[in-house]
Image (cartoon, helix red, strand yellow):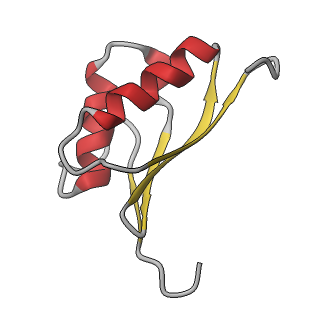
Amino acid sequence: MIGASVHYAPTEGGPLPTGLADAVRTALDKTGHGWLRRIEVGVESGCVVLRGRVKSFYLKQMAQVTVLAVPGADLVRNDLQVEGGRR
């Protein structure tokens, strides 16, 4: 995207939270699901973007619901891929 603001939160073990991407990263980490800790979190033009792989459609949905519970995360693009290709 030209002119889009893009920010990515580090995965587990990175710097302290500073913005929306980091708040989402923290929320995903707190779920206790190891697969959700591996998700790449970005913010593009105010939309939270989830990328990576999860082992089930349930975890893909759980990630999305977790993100929507974070204040300021009003838009989510869930680009997560389910291992095995089932959606």
Residue 24 rendering spot, x and y as whole percentages: 30, 41
Q: Can residue 7 be seen in this snapshot?
A: yes
Q: Quadrant of the C terminus?
A: top right
Direction from residue 41 to residue 2 in the image, left or right: right
Residue 69 rendering spot, x and y as whole percentages: 25, 32
Residue 43 rendering spot, x and y as whole percentages: 40, 59
Q: Residue at x 25, y 21 (%)?
A: 30
Answer above or below: position of 30 versus 26. Answer: above
Nearer to us in this view, 35 or 47: 47
Nearer to us in this view, 26 or 75: 75
List the single residue furthest toward the bottom. Answer: 3
Residue 85 rendering spot, x and y as whole percentages: 82, 22
Answer above or below: position of 45 versus 49. Answer: below
Answer above or below: position of 39 versus 41. Answer: above
Direction from residue 86 to residue 38 in the image, left or right: left
List the single residue furthest toward the front. Answer: 74
Q: Quadrant of the N terminus?
A: bottom right
How many numbered discs sit on the rendered protein?
Answer: 0
Direction from residue 57 to residue 45 in the image, left or right: left
Q: Residue at x 44, y 31 (%)?
A: 64
**What is the quadrant of residue 66 in the picture?**
top left
Q: Residue at x 61, y 37 (%)?
A: 52
Q: Can residue 13 be seen in this snapshot?
A: no
Answer above or below: position of 85 versus 8. Answer: above
List the single residue furthest toward the right. Answer: 85
Q: Residue at x 41, y 13 (%)?
A: 33
